[in-house]
Amino acid sequence: MGTFIVEHEVVIRSVFFFGVFAVMAVWGLFAPYRQLTTPKSLRWLTNLVLVFINRIMMQVIFPNGMLLTTVTGMASPNPARVMAL
């Protein structure tokens, strides 16, 4: 089971993302929370762009942050001091 999830991570994430997006989009069409001041297409496009920018930034920042933490910990004369930060 664990290897199936790892092997198909992208598909599973995509299905959940687009599934939730579709449910929220339909919900927004039939039961808007408030009066719209901008077109829905512009709002949806903006939200999708933010999602994709967030995804790209996380793929760049998160691995490099882990690398920086590892290098900092290895270079420290006292590893316990780094752990306390």
Image: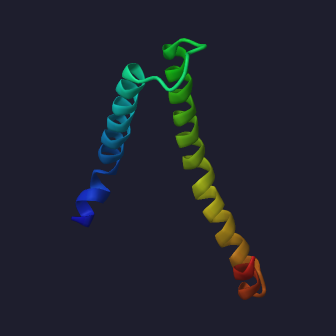
Viewed as shown, does residue 13 lie left or right of 37?
A: left
Q: Residue at x 50, y 28 (%)?
A: 48
Quarter of the image that includes the C terminus = bottom right
Q: Residue at x 65, y 60 (%)?
A: 65
Number of marks drawn: 0
Q: Residue 1 at what x, y percent from top left? A: 21, 64
Viewed as shown, does residue 53 lie left or right of 75?
A: left
Q: Residue at x 67, y 68 (%)?
A: 69
> Viewer-proximal residue, 58 or 45?
45
Q: Which quadrant of the figure has residue 11?
A: top left
Q: Residue 29 at what x, y percent from top left? A: 39, 20
Q: Residue 82 at what x, y percent from top left? A: 74, 79
Q: Which quadrant of the figure has residue 2?
A: bottom left
Q: Is residue 83 above or below residue 2?
A: below
Q: Is residue 72 above or below residue 4?
A: below
Q: Is residue 82 above or below residue 58?
A: below
Q: Which quadrant of the figure has residue 30?
A: top left
